[in-house]
Amino acid sequence: MNSGRVQAARSELLRVASEGSADVAWALARSYDPNFLRTVSADAAPDIAEATRWYRTWYAIAVKQGLVADSVPLERIIRSMRSTG
């Protein structure tokens, strides 16, 4: 995905997303996040609604698995897309 092949990365990530991996959900969120997509020569358009959905999915999985604290500022991540997207 860092090389700009976001569409291919999304397809592969969506194929394994049902496995409940926090890493997969985070990568999917980033693949739609306009802030991230501006940092690579992406072959895909941003989608704030999809990014928000996947960030929320990531957060739920990560908190449940003890990977992040319940106090991680998820809403700040989401707001940052809206202010720049």
Image (tube, rainbow, N blue to C red):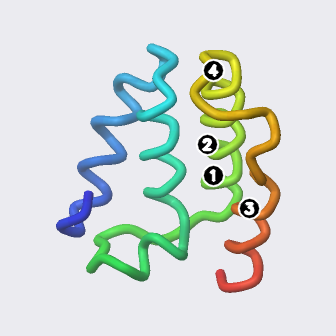
Tell me the SS state at disc 3: helix
In 3D space, how far apart are the residues under numbered discs 3 and 4 (Cα atoms)? 21 Å
The answer to which of marks 4 and 1 sits earlier in the sequence is 1
Residue type, mark 3 in image:
Ile
- For label 1, the residue is 50
Q: Nearer the viewer, mark 3 or mark 4?
A: 4
**Is 44 positioned to the left or the right of 49 in the image?**
left
- For label 2, the residue is 54
Query: Is 5 situated above or below 34?
Result: above
Please state, as top left, top right, bottom left or bottom right, where the N terminus lies in the image: bottom left
The answer to which of marks 3 and 4 sits earlier in the sequence is 4
| Residue 75 numbered mark, or none | none
Residue type, mark 4 in image:
Gly
In the image, what residue occupies the spot 28% across and 36% down? 12
Residue 75's image quarter?
bottom right
| Residue 66 numbered mark, or none | 4
| Residue 78 numbered mark, or none | 3
* Labels 1 & 2 near each other (Cβ < 8 A): yes
Residue type, mark 1 in image:
Glu
